[in-house]
Amino acid sequence: METASTTPNPTITTTCSSSNQNNNNHHHDAETTTAAAAAAAPENPQEPHPEPPPPPPPPHILPGPRAARLQELYAQSLRRTLAKLKWENFAACYPTVASRAEPVLRQVQAQMVEKLGEKCEKEFESILVARQVVSKLNDLEALISEATHRRITAPPDAPKPTPPHLLPAREILSAHLAPSLASHQSLLNARLQTAQSHNAILYDRIRAQRADIESLLGLLEGTVGDVRSANEALEPVVGVLAREAMDAERAVLEE
Protein backbone atom coordinates (compact mmCIF):
# COMPACT_ATOMS: atom_id res chain seq x y z
CA MET A 1 0.00 0.00 0.00
CA GLU A 2 1.38 3.35 -1.05
CA THR A 3 1.65 6.24 1.45
CA ALA A 4 0.67 9.73 0.32
CA SER A 5 3.41 12.28 0.52
CA THR A 6 2.84 15.18 2.90
CA THR A 7 5.60 17.37 1.55
CA PRO A 8 4.15 20.79 0.65
CA ASN A 9 4.44 22.02 -2.90
CA PRO A 10 6.65 25.12 -2.95
CA THR A 11 4.87 26.49 -6.01
CA ILE A 12 1.42 26.39 -4.33
CA THR A 13 2.85 27.91 -1.12
CA THR A 14 4.45 30.76 -3.01
CA THR A 15 1.24 31.42 -4.96
CA CYS A 16 -0.87 31.50 -1.79
CA SER A 17 1.58 33.83 -0.09
CA SER A 18 1.53 36.19 -3.05
CA SER A 19 -2.29 36.09 -3.16
CA ASN A 20 -2.57 36.87 0.55
CA GLN A 21 -0.11 39.74 0.23
CA ASN A 22 -2.07 41.19 -2.69
CA ASN A 23 -5.33 40.90 -0.74
CA ASN A 24 -3.75 42.68 2.22
CA ASN A 25 -2.48 45.43 -0.05
CA HIS A 26 -5.92 45.90 -1.64
CA HIS A 27 -7.57 45.96 1.79
CA HIS A 28 -5.05 48.56 3.01
CA ASP A 29 -5.63 50.70 -0.09
CA ALA A 30 -9.42 50.54 0.40
CA GLU A 31 -9.10 51.59 4.05
CA THR A 32 -6.81 54.47 3.05
CA THR A 33 -9.27 55.65 0.37
CA THR A 34 -12.21 55.46 2.80
CA ALA A 35 -10.32 57.42 5.44
CA ALA A 36 -9.32 60.09 2.90
CA ALA A 37 -12.91 60.43 1.71
CA ALA A 38 -14.14 60.74 5.30
CA ALA A 39 -11.52 63.41 6.03
CA ALA A 40 -12.42 65.34 2.86
CA ALA A 41 -16.14 65.28 3.68
CA PRO A 42 -17.40 68.46 5.40
CA GLU A 43 -18.02 68.22 9.13
CA ASN A 44 -21.37 69.97 8.96
CA PRO A 45 -23.14 68.91 5.76
CA GLN A 46 -25.79 71.26 4.48
CA GLU A 47 -29.19 70.34 5.81
CA PRO A 48 -31.84 69.68 3.16
CA HIS A 49 -34.48 72.34 2.72
CA PRO A 50 -37.78 71.47 4.36
CA GLU A 51 -40.54 70.58 1.95
CA PRO A 52 -43.40 73.08 1.68
CA PRO A 53 -46.53 72.07 3.58
CA PRO A 54 -49.27 70.46 1.51
CA PRO A 55 -52.22 72.66 0.50
CA PRO A 56 -55.13 72.64 2.94
CA PRO A 57 -58.01 70.32 2.02
CA PRO A 58 -61.14 71.92 0.56
CA PRO A 59 -63.84 72.78 3.10
CA HIS A 60 -66.40 70.04 3.67
CA ILE A 61 -69.83 70.89 2.25
CA LEU A 62 -72.85 69.25 3.77
CA PRO A 63 -74.93 67.57 1.04
CA GLY A 64 -78.49 68.69 0.53
CA PRO A 65 -81.45 66.41 -0.16
CA ARG A 66 -80.59 65.88 -3.82
CA ALA A 67 -76.89 65.33 -3.17
CA ALA A 68 -77.66 62.93 -0.32
CA ARG A 69 -80.13 61.05 -2.53
CA LEU A 70 -77.49 60.78 -5.28
CA GLN A 71 -74.94 59.31 -2.87
CA GLU A 72 -77.55 56.92 -1.46
CA LEU A 73 -78.59 55.80 -4.95
CA TYR A 74 -74.96 55.17 -5.93
CA ALA A 75 -74.35 53.16 -2.77
CA GLN A 76 -77.42 51.01 -3.45
CA SER A 77 -76.41 50.45 -7.07
CA LEU A 78 -72.88 49.53 -6.03
CA ARG A 79 -74.14 47.05 -3.44
CA ARG A 80 -76.44 45.43 -6.00
CA THR A 81 -73.60 45.18 -8.52
CA LEU A 82 -71.22 43.64 -6.02
CA ALA A 83 -73.94 41.23 -4.93
CA LYS A 84 -73.68 39.64 -8.38
CA LEU A 85 -70.20 38.48 -7.36
CA LYS A 86 -71.57 36.09 -4.75
CA TRP A 87 -69.89 32.78 -4.04
CA GLU A 88 -72.12 30.64 -6.25
CA ASN A 89 -71.46 32.76 -9.37
CA PHE A 90 -67.76 33.07 -8.57
CA ALA A 91 -67.34 29.34 -7.96
CA ALA A 92 -69.13 28.55 -11.23
CA CYS A 93 -66.36 30.40 -13.08
CA TYR A 94 -63.63 28.34 -11.39
CA PRO A 95 -65.13 24.89 -10.73
CA THR A 96 -61.79 23.06 -10.43
CA VAL A 97 -60.35 25.48 -7.89
CA ALA A 98 -63.67 25.58 -6.03
CA SER A 99 -63.67 21.81 -5.63
CA ARG A 100 -60.02 21.47 -4.62
CA ALA A 101 -59.28 24.72 -2.70
CA GLU A 102 -62.62 26.15 -1.65
CA PRO A 103 -61.32 28.19 1.38
CA VAL A 104 -58.65 29.91 -0.73
CA LEU A 105 -61.12 30.74 -3.48
CA ARG A 106 -63.63 32.08 -0.94
CA GLN A 107 -60.92 34.34 0.48
CA VAL A 108 -60.04 35.59 -3.00
CA GLN A 109 -63.72 36.27 -3.75
CA ALA A 110 -64.18 38.23 -0.50
CA GLN A 111 -61.03 40.28 -1.09
CA MET A 112 -62.03 41.02 -4.67
CA VAL A 113 -65.48 42.24 -3.62
CA GLU A 114 -64.01 44.37 -0.83
CA LYS A 115 -61.27 45.96 -2.95
CA LEU A 116 -63.62 46.61 -5.86
CA GLY A 117 -66.12 48.31 -3.55
CA GLU A 118 -63.44 50.52 -1.97
CA LYS A 119 -62.03 51.53 -5.35
CA CYS A 120 -65.47 52.41 -6.73
CA GLU A 121 -66.31 54.50 -3.67
CA LYS A 122 -63.02 56.41 -3.85
CA GLU A 123 -63.45 57.05 -7.56
CA PHE A 124 -66.99 58.30 -7.01
CA GLU A 125 -65.85 60.64 -4.22
CA SER A 126 -63.06 62.03 -6.41
CA ILE A 127 -65.57 62.71 -9.20
CA LEU A 128 -67.88 64.50 -6.76
CA VAL A 129 -65.03 66.73 -5.57
CA ALA A 130 -63.59 67.40 -9.04
CA ARG A 131 -66.97 68.29 -10.57
CA GLN A 132 -68.25 70.12 -7.46
CA VAL A 133 -71.41 68.04 -7.63
CA VAL A 134 -72.50 68.62 -4.04
CA SER A 135 -72.18 72.41 -4.16
CA LYS A 136 -73.95 72.62 -7.52
CA LEU A 137 -76.81 70.43 -6.33
CA ASN A 138 -77.08 72.60 -3.22
CA ASP A 139 -77.28 75.68 -5.46
CA LEU A 140 -80.03 73.95 -7.42
CA GLU A 141 -81.88 73.31 -4.14
CA ALA A 142 -81.62 76.98 -3.21
CA LEU A 143 -82.79 78.05 -6.68
CA ILE A 144 -85.79 75.74 -6.59
CA SER A 145 -86.76 76.83 -3.07
CA GLU A 146 -86.48 80.48 -4.07
CA ALA A 147 -88.64 79.90 -7.15
CA THR A 148 -91.23 78.06 -5.05
CA HIS A 149 -91.29 80.90 -2.52
CA ARG A 150 -91.75 83.47 -5.27
CA ARG A 151 -94.58 81.47 -6.79
CA ILE A 152 -96.35 81.15 -3.45
CA THR A 153 -95.91 84.80 -2.43
CA ALA A 154 -96.77 86.21 -5.87
CA PRO A 155 -100.11 88.10 -6.04
CA PRO A 156 -102.96 86.40 -7.92
CA ASP A 157 -103.01 89.04 -10.67
CA ALA A 158 -99.26 88.86 -11.30
CA PRO A 159 -98.28 87.96 -14.89
CA LYS A 160 -97.09 84.44 -15.40
CA PRO A 161 -93.31 84.12 -15.98
CA THR A 162 -92.09 83.20 -19.42
CA PRO A 163 -90.89 79.60 -19.69
CA PRO A 164 -87.10 79.32 -20.05
CA HIS A 165 -87.30 77.74 -23.50
CA LEU A 166 -89.19 80.81 -24.79
CA LEU A 167 -86.75 83.41 -23.48
CA PRO A 168 -84.54 85.26 -26.00
CA ALA A 169 -80.87 84.42 -26.22
CA ARG A 170 -79.78 87.77 -24.76
CA GLU A 171 -81.73 87.23 -21.53
CA ILE A 172 -80.45 83.67 -21.16
CA LEU A 173 -76.89 84.86 -21.65
CA SER A 174 -77.38 87.65 -19.12
CA ALA A 175 -78.80 85.17 -16.61
CA HIS A 176 -75.76 82.89 -17.02
CA LEU A 177 -73.31 85.79 -16.73
CA ALA A 178 -75.08 87.49 -13.81
CA PRO A 179 -73.22 85.63 -10.98
CA SER A 180 -69.74 86.25 -12.39
CA LEU A 181 -70.60 89.83 -13.32
CA ALA A 182 -71.95 90.45 -9.82
CA SER A 183 -68.66 89.33 -8.24
CA HIS A 184 -66.68 91.49 -10.68
CA GLN A 185 -69.00 94.42 -9.97
CA SER A 186 -68.42 94.14 -6.23
CA LEU A 187 -64.67 94.03 -6.83
CA LEU A 188 -64.81 97.09 -9.08
CA ASN A 189 -66.95 98.94 -6.52
CA ALA A 190 -64.36 98.26 -3.83
CA ARG A 191 -61.59 99.52 -6.11
CA LEU A 192 -63.66 102.60 -6.96
CA GLN A 193 -64.20 103.41 -3.28
CA THR A 194 -60.47 103.03 -2.63
CA ALA A 195 -59.64 105.34 -5.55
CA GLN A 196 -62.20 107.90 -4.34
CA SER A 197 -60.70 107.93 -0.84
CA HIS A 198 -57.21 108.42 -2.30
CA ASN A 199 -58.50 111.21 -4.52
CA ALA A 200 -60.11 112.94 -1.52
CA ILE A 201 -56.79 112.81 0.35
CA LEU A 202 -54.94 114.21 -2.68
CA TYR A 203 -57.58 116.95 -3.09
CA ASP A 204 -57.13 118.10 0.51
CA ARG A 205 -53.36 118.08 0.07
CA ILE A 206 -53.60 120.16 -3.14
CA ARG A 207 -55.92 122.67 -1.43
CA ALA A 208 -53.41 123.07 1.42
CA GLN A 209 -50.57 123.56 -1.07
CA ARG A 210 -52.60 126.19 -2.97
CA ALA A 211 -53.27 128.05 0.29
CA ASP A 212 -49.54 128.08 1.03
CA ILE A 213 -48.80 129.34 -2.49
CA GLU A 214 -51.37 132.14 -2.15
CA SER A 215 -49.93 133.22 1.21
CA LEU A 216 -46.39 133.25 -0.28
CA LEU A 217 -47.63 135.31 -3.24
CA GLY A 218 -49.23 137.78 -0.83
CA LEU A 219 -45.95 138.19 1.05
CA LEU A 220 -44.05 138.58 -2.23
CA GLU A 221 -46.48 141.25 -3.47
CA GLY A 222 -46.04 143.14 -0.18
CA THR A 223 -42.26 143.02 -0.55
CA VAL A 224 -42.50 144.26 -4.16
CA GLY A 225 -44.71 147.15 -2.98
CA ASP A 226 -42.15 148.08 -0.33
CA VAL A 227 -39.36 148.11 -2.94
CA ARG A 228 -41.41 150.32 -5.25
CA SER A 229 -42.19 152.74 -2.43
CA ALA A 230 -38.48 152.95 -1.59
CA ASN A 231 -37.65 153.66 -5.24
CA GLU A 232 -40.27 156.42 -5.38
CA ALA A 233 -38.87 157.99 -2.19
CA LEU A 234 -35.30 157.91 -3.49
CA GLU A 235 -36.15 159.19 -6.99
CA PRO A 236 -35.72 162.98 -6.21
CA VAL A 237 -32.21 162.54 -4.74
CA VAL A 238 -30.93 159.93 -7.16
CA GLY A 239 -29.46 162.54 -9.52
CA VAL A 240 -27.72 164.43 -6.72
CA LEU A 241 -26.25 161.24 -5.27
CA ALA A 242 -25.07 160.19 -8.74
CA ARG A 243 -23.24 163.52 -9.30
CA GLU A 244 -21.61 163.38 -5.86
CA ALA A 245 -20.41 159.86 -6.55
CA MET A 246 -18.98 160.86 -9.93
CA ASP A 247 -17.20 163.89 -8.40
CA ALA A 248 -15.72 161.76 -5.64
CA GLU A 249 -14.51 159.20 -8.14
CA ARG A 250 -12.96 161.91 -10.32
CA ALA A 251 -11.17 163.40 -7.32
CA VAL A 252 -9.71 160.06 -6.40
CA LEU A 253 -8.47 159.52 -9.93
CA GLU A 254 -6.79 162.98 -10.08
CA GLU A 255 -4.92 162.34 -6.86
Image (cartoon, grey):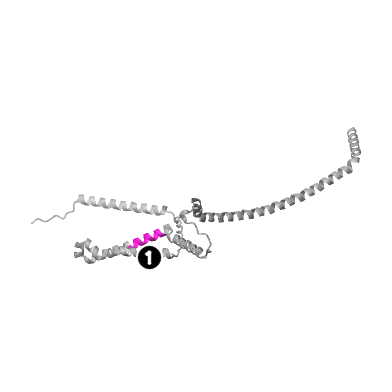
Q: Is residue 233 left or right of residue 102?
A: right
Front-most of residues 194 and 153: 153
Near mark 1 (Cα within 10 A), the count class, few <14, some 14-19 or many ≥20, is few
Q: Label the magenta part by its dominant secondary structure.
A: helix
Q: Is residue 46 left or right of residue 1?
A: right
Q: Is residue 8 left or right of residue 81?
A: left
Give percent across and percent down for residue 85: 27, 63
Front-most of residues 171 and 101: 171
Magenta part of the protein: which range?
Answer: 117-128
Magenta highlight on residue 208: no
Kind of residue indicated by mark 1 = Glu
Residue that label 1 marks: 72
Which residue extends farthest bottom?
103
Which residue extends farthest front?
157
Regarding residue 169, the answer to whether it shows in the image is yes
Give percent across and percent down for residue 216: 77, 49
